[in-house]
Every structure is written in C-alpha cells, then in structure tokens.
Amino acid sequence: MHFNTPCFGTVEYEQKDIIHFQDGLFGFENMIDYLLIHISPIEDSFMYLQSLQDENLSFILANPFTLYPGYSPSLSKEDLIQLDLQDDTPVIFYSICVLNKNIAHSTCNLKAPLVIRTDTRKGFQVVLQDPQYGFHHPFPDLSLDERGELRC
C-alpha cells in the first residue's frame, strides 16, 4: 500500500505498519489509523506520526526517555486495564512535540504521552497523574555526540 504525505511524498507501508488508536488522539478522536515515519535512519529520538485519514495531519514525536533521561511515567490502574497491559507487555512511549524556530521555545507533552503496544500495534494517549510532567514541558539542551547521535 502507499500513502501520499506533504512532507515525505509517497510512503510505502504494509497493514502491519499501521498503528490503531481506538479512541483517536485528544482533539482528533476521529483520526484513528497512523504510520510512524522515521525522520533519520540512524536516530529514533524524533519521528512523525502520520494520519492515514488526513494526509495533512501529522505530529512530531519524541522519545521522551532520550530527551528526558529521568522521565518515569506511571500508568494508572485504569490505564493498565484499558491498555490490557501486563508486566511483560512490550510498549513504547512517545511524546507529541511543538517545535519552534528557536528550539529553546519548543516543548514536549510529557503529561499525555502516546503508549503503543508493539505486539498488537494498538496505541493509546493517556494522561499521567504525576504533577511533575506538563503538557508544554520545555525542551532540554540538545547536541550531538561524536557518532552524530542525540545527546541531552
């Protein structure tokens, strides 16, 4: 299958690549099927989440554990039940980012991360109860190490 995007042109994908958000994302409840598009083949700190229902809808995602090494999201009992998560369920977390021309004014939503089950390709957006995480958490200072990988 293929899908046309404004940023990446035609993207080839298979059914197994689709991430299904049963409840959509906050503010986009009717947009339920997405593709994760790698921005860099060697770095997975940032990715695009491209809607398959609307070619003009995409989000920039960050791996919150790379940007914020102390990030430790704790899911509520209700979240665990809704996501059908056990201790050994493989999941990945992403944060939606708002980028500014001045990177120092860019933010990540650490309060409402995306949780994706890698075994079923089902995604959910949850709201963490921890007050230390905000919807507009400032970006850390970013630089690259000697291998060209992101260092925070």
Image: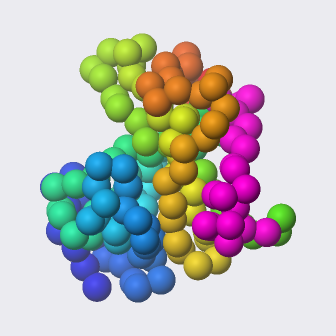
At 64% from the left edge and 58% from the top edge, which residue is drawn? 79
Report the front residue among 150 and 117. Answer: 117
In this view, 44 is above or below 119:
above
Left or right: where 50 falls relative to 130: left
In this view, 63 is above or below 49:
above
In this view, 99 is above or below 118:
above
Q: Which residues are magenta?
A: 68-86
What colouring does the structure picture have? Answer: rainbow
For the N terminus, the quadrant is: bottom left
> Quick one: which residue is furthest to the right in this view?
87
What main secondary structure does the magenta stretch of the protein show? loop
In this view, 100 is above or below 63:
above
Residue 110 image position (x, y, % from top left): 55, 35
Residue 11 image position (x, y, % from top left): 28, 70
Q: Quadrant of residue 31?
A: bottom left
At 54% from the left edge and 44% from the top edge, which residue is drawn? 127
Is residue 73 shown in magenta? yes
